[in-house]
Image: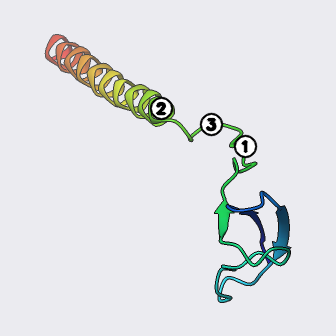
């Protein structure tokens, strides 16, 4: 269950509480019965490795495209050499 941070708009009292996703947000301060505000903090998530950025996926697809085109060009050059050899042999 996640931990939520609340702060009172009237007295400034701040506290954390563990609540379920289905629980309603707290609205009254436990000390002064004032209005509570939910505080949002930075999330501690770190993405490591390749494939998380747009340019990571583009560089791998560009290299696979160039590999495909170079293999097809080598096939065509091999095929022309074979036809030259067969016409010379006859």
Report which residue position mark 2 lands on. Answer: 60
Q: Quadrant of the N terminus?
A: bottom right
Q: Is residue 13 left or right of residue 6?
A: right
Q: Which mark is residue 70?
A: none
Q: Give the percent coordinates (x, y) of residue 78.
A: 29, 20
Q: Please provide percent x and percent y for residue 89.
A: 20, 14
For residue 73, which quarter of the picture? top left
Residue bearing the label numbered 1:
46
The Cα–Cα distance between marks 1 and 3, rounded to whole angstroms, is: 12 Å
Q: Earlier in the sequence, mark 3 or mark 2?
A: 3
Q: Describe residue 68's horizontal placement relative to residue 82 as left or right.
A: right
The crowd level at tag 1 (other Cα within 10 Å; few <14, some 14-19, many 20+) is: few
Return the x and y of residue 46 as percentages of the image width and height: 72, 43
Q: Nearer the viewer, residue 84 or 29?
A: 29
Q: Quadrant of the C terminus?
A: top left
Mark 2 vs 1, N-terminal side:
1
Residue located beneath label 3 in the image = 50
């Amino acid at each position: 269950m996640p931990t939520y941070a609340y702060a009172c708009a009237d007295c400034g009292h701040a506290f954390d509480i563990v609540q379920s996703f289905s629980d309603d947000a707290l609205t009254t301060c436990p000390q002064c019965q004032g209005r509570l505000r939910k505080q949002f903090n930075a999330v501690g998530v770190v993405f490591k490795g390749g494939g998380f950025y747009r340019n990571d996926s583009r560089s791998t697809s560009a290299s696979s495209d160039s590999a495909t085109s170079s293999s097809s060009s080598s096939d065509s050059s091999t095929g022309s050499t074979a036809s030259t050899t067969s016409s010379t042999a006859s």
